[in-house]
Image (spheres, grey):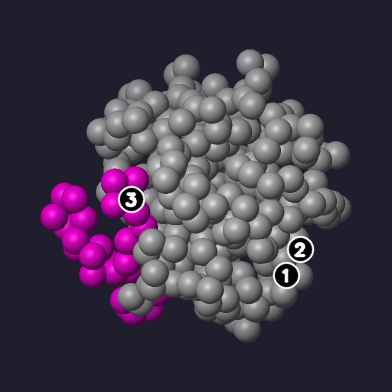
Amino acid sequence: MMTGLAFAFFQGPIHVRVAPAGRDQPPAAGQANPPSKECALSSRSRAFFDQLLATHNISRAYFNGQHDRCYCDYCYNSFMPDVIVAGPTQYIVPRGWYRFGIDVPRGLVQQEDIFRKWSVSFHGTRAYLLKSLLSNGLAMPGDKLLDGSILASHNCAGRQDHCIYTSPTIRYAGLGFYTSITEFSFNGQNLVGQTVLQCRQQPGTYRMQGETMGFRSRWNQQVLCLALPDQSQVEWTTEVRAGVVPYGLLVRVFEPGSLPDNFESPVDNGRFEHIKRAALPGVAGGVGVAAARGLGARRGQGD
């Protein structure tokens, strides 16, 4: 029984600044630095990224390295803001994650001006679905994927909500319960990686709501993210596929037995105990597909 437990989803002071217009502009304006050669997260994240592409047959043509960003403590230090006003809503910076830029069609950027007028949101996903999502955009339960399978919701009490779920904070969308975890190896070391899509979302096409997993009502978890004062806005739902445009693949890499502070949630029911005990089996240089499919999925968002 986990009644009364309070999980930390955000730590430290909150710094807010007004961002310049455009696509996650330069470091001098408070954005993350381009990946540094001295950054440990960069090399691990790139190894994870390379293995994801190889395992799931994903073309590098989907990505644009000019928009890669690292949000580790070295590349995005504690003096840089946690919250940026970018577009119609605030942008909560994904600290601890590494972004691989996705190549967004230039016509869409110019026509809709998405990096000035659309909101930033996050969408947790499973690694083996990335190819389909990059090809066709975000999907809903009931959609047929490229491999012919029908997409089903997960972790939603049997419901098949015909909508896409996102969140304005990665500290919610990036929970282990909402994403998959993938085992991989780097320089002979077993590591764990997660995947989340960073998106721009068109205002007026989504509805904001509070979390629907009972974190507050069943486990008295009052604060999901201190950078999001209004907890009634932590989930966004939409039925407009074209209104959600991924522009970055965010990955988080960590060692078994050393979970990030916002990885666990009250509804995990012990599913990550083997990681906490650092008891992952050996992975001989490849991504663990079974782990990618089975250990976690975003509730109700269809992938």
Structural distance between the alpha carbons of marks 3 and 2: 30 Å
Q: Residue at x 71, y 33 (%)?
A: 26
- Are there few (<14), some (14-19), or many (20+) residues within 10 Å of tag 3? some
The vertical placement of 73 against 223, above or below, is above
Which residue is drawn at the image coordinates 60% and 33% (left, top)? Answer: 69
* 145 drawn magenta: yes
Which corner quadrant of the image does residue 169 belong to? bottom right
State the image quarter where residue 160 is shown: bottom left
Q: How many marks?
A: 3
Distance CA(mark 2)–CA(mark 1): 6 Å
Screen quadrant of the N terminus: bottom right
Q: Which residue is mark 2?
A: 226
Q: Position of residue 24 (x, y in %)?
A: 64, 41
Left or right side of 146 for 31: right
For the record, the magenta segment spans 133-160
**Vertical placement of 277 versus 230: above or below?**
above
What is the x, y in percent for residue 22?
A: 64, 44
